Image (spheres, coloured by chain):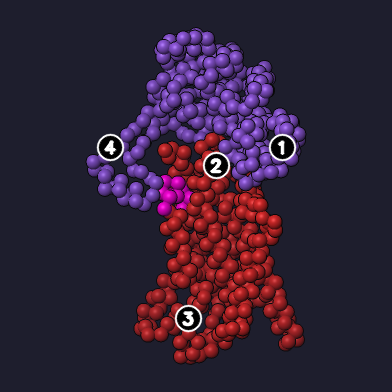
Chain colours: A purple, B red
């Protein structure tokens, strides 16, 4: 951890995020007319995903987010990834070189940006572009990316990705995302996939990122992965932080709450 | 809302989008790659369509049912190709955001790049079809030069062509902003747009001339003038009329065709007052669409 007076890598201040569920039923014309008729009787249900949550993450920390489904983990990650804005409160990246445009690499369901009809190589370049890597930089990194993805049959790189196995898909997506020189890496449950050799490679890469002082936030339900990688664990429950601290301690509390033996 | 604040907001959003201009180029590339995915001839298909259309219009309207206007098919094409740009541009843009939600949910980038990318990809296709039209026009003006011994050139309004392309692109981009944002919350928008555009095809002068609207038989003169003015208040009418006047000369349509009693001069020139009004309208539709899109773009991912 860095000195207390240096700015944090990531900060959430009094963040509130709510979602409206059901209600207007935007699906189509019929649904909309139906909803308009029902509006008088039907109440919209508001779900609070994050309730006045504040936290800071120091540069170089590797933070695991724990919690049951619907506890707000993914919402928090989406807010940090800047795909959502909080209803109130603030998300900030004070330690970034450009605090308004931090270099984030979101490994959220890797390969989400892949187009099924384009080839592996085409998708690699497109995915790089969307993560802010210029074509020139991408050309320099192409070899390293393909080496990391490690296809047994390289001819697949020129085939549409819809012909890929899920393992190949994820390996390629992961390979691009880690080659973007990120300040902050956000990982959403994607490390649990792929074969064991690839998982080991991902762990090694995470260790390397950690050694280089980059900040990592990941979501995982696999406590072995949390123990292996995290320097800090945060347990989210009912839209708030239930525990925050040493991974071993937080995992113990988490297990105790649900009556799971360690 | 305060106008100064509105302009400032729009400016800062545009500045953020400008940072991502390289990604915009990539999105356009991807649109073009995906359209002809797995096809052997690839992008050559975007030439095949206008060539086939030009050929069939020439066969039908200059050979099978000649209407007494020389090179009538050229007059049809000069409005048909820009119409196709408008039609495909607006329809492709409708689901430009909703069909890429997987990406939008996961990664930040200025969302307005998506409707802009489909608009620019369609602009590229339109430029190709203009190229086909240009070949036809070179042939027409070339044979005329040969026959008369005097150099035949398109009208001087020809210089207006870049302005026309720009204003049409702004119009399509503006509608793309509105429709792509609405379609995320309300997926009937695309189907509704398809129906409206299908009808609008007959409401703008493509298969007829704007001058014919003014002499519609069986109506009092005052009413005809009102209808004529209403036509010209539609920026697409003005754009199509202007394309024709940019590229082709005035003609006389012989009496009896389409039911008018006297010979009718057609393609008489750019309707200037309405042209200037349309320029203003196109700019406002673009800026208004952008502002509308920006007010909704952060709610796209919250659709459950």
Number of other residues with Cα within 10 Å of mark 4, as a class: few under 14, some 14 to 19, many 20 or more:
few
Horizontally, residue B181 falls left or right of residue A2, namely: left
- Name the subunit of mark 3: B
- CA gap between label 2 and label 1 equals 21 Å
Tell me where residue B66 appears, x and y as whole percent: 58, 85
Residue A182 magenta: no
Identify the mark at residue B43; answer none if there is no mark. Answer: none
Task: Work out whether residue B125 can be spotted.
Answer: yes
- CA gap between label 3 and label 4 equals 56 Å
- Name the subunit of mark 4: A
Number of other residues with Cα within 10 Å of mark 1, as a class: few under 14, some 14 to 19, many 20 or more:
many
- CA gap between label 4 and label 1 equals 50 Å
Query: What residue sits right under mark 2 in the picture?
Result: B110
Number of other residues with Cα within 10 Å of mark 3, as a class: few under 14, some 14 to 19, many 20 or more:
some
- CA gap between label 3 and label 2 equals 46 Å
Q: In the rendered view of the protein, which quadrant contains the C terminus of chain B?
A: top left
Does the CB distance between marks 2 and 4 fall below 8 Å?
no
Mark 2 vs mark 4: give the one in front.
Answer: 4
Horizontally, residue A224 falls left or right of residue B297, namely: right
Q: In percent of the image, x 58 and y 30: which residue is there?
A: A107
- Name the subunit of mark 1: A
Q: Which residues are magenta?
A: B179-188
Does the CB distance between marks 2 and 1 fall below 8 Å?
no
Q: In percent of the image, x 68 and y 66: which residue is there?
A: B131
Query: What residue sits right under mark 4 in the picture?
Result: A43
Callouts 2 and 4 on one subunit: no
Looking at the picture, does residue A156 appear above or below residue B215?
above
């Amino acid at each position: 951890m860095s000195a207390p007076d240096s700015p944090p890598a990531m900060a959430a201040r009094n963040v509130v995020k709510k979602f409206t569920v059901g209600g207007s039923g935007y699906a189509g014309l019929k649904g909309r007319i139906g909803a308009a008729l029902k509006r008088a009787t039907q109440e919209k249900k508001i779900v609070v995903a994050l309730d006045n949550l504040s936290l800071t993450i120091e540069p170089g920390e590797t933070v695991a987010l724990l919690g049951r489904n619907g506890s707000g983990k993914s919402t928090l990650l989406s807010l940090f990834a800047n795909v959502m804005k909080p209803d109130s409160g603030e998300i900030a990246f004070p330690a970034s070189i450009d605090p308004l445009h931090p270099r984030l690499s979101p490994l959220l369901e890797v390969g989400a940006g892949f187009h099924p009809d384009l080839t592996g190589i085409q998708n690699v370049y497109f995915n790089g572009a969307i993560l802010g890597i210029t074509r020139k930089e991408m050309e320099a990194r192409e070899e390293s990316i393909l080496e990391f993805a490690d296809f047994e049959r390289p001819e697949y790189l020129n085939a549409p990705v819809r012909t890929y196995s899920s393992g190949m898909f994820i390996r390629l997506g992961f390979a691009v995302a880690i080659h973007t020189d990120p300040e902050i890496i956000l990982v959403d449950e994607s490390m649990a996939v792929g074969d064991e050799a690839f998982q080991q490679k991902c762990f090694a890469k995470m260790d390397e990122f950690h050694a280089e002082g980059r900040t990592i936030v990941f979501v995982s339900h696999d406590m072995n992965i949390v123990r292996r990688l995290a320097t800090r664990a945060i347990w989210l429950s009912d839209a708030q932080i239930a525990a925050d601290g040493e991974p071993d301690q937080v995992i113990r509390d988490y297990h105790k709450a649900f009556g799971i033996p360690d | 809302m305060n106008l100064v604040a509105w302009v400032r907001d729009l400016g800062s959003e545009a500045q953020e989008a400008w940072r991502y201009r390289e990604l915009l180029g990539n999105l356009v590339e991807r649109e073009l790659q995906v359209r002809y995915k797995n096809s052997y001839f690839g992008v050559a298909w975007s030439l095949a369509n206008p060539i086939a259309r030009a050929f069939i219009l020439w066969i039908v309207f200059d050979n099978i049912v000649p209407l007494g206007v020389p090179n009538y098919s050229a007059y049809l094409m000069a409005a048909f190709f820009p119409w196709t740009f408008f039609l495909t541009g607006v329809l492709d843009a409708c689901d430009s955001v909703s069909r890429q939600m997987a990406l939008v949910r996961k990664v930040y980038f200025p969302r307005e790049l998506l409707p802009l990318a489909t608009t620019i990809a369609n602009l590229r296709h339109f430029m190709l079809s203009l190229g086909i039209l240009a070949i036809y026009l070179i042939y027409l003006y070339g044979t005329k030069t040969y026959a008369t011994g005097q150099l035949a050139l398109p009208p001087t309004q020809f210089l207006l062509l870049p302005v026309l392309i720009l204003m049409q692109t702004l119009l399509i981009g503006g509608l793309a902003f509105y429709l792509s944002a609405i379609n995320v919350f309300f997926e009937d928008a695309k189907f509704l747009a398809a129906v409206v555009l299908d009808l609008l095809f007959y409401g703008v002068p493509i298969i007829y001339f704007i001058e014919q609207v003014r002499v519609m038989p069986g109506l009092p003169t005052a009413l005809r003038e009102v209808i004529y003015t209403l036509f010209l208040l539609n920026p697409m009418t003005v754009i199509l009329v202007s394309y024709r006047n940019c590229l082709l000369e005035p003609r006389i349509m012989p009496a009896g065709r389409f039911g008018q009693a006297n010979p009718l001069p057609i393609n008489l020139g750019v309707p200037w007052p309405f042209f200037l009004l349309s320029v203003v309208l196109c700019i406002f539709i673009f800026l208004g669409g952008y502002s509308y899109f920006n007010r909704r773009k952060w709610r796209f991912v919250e659709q459950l």
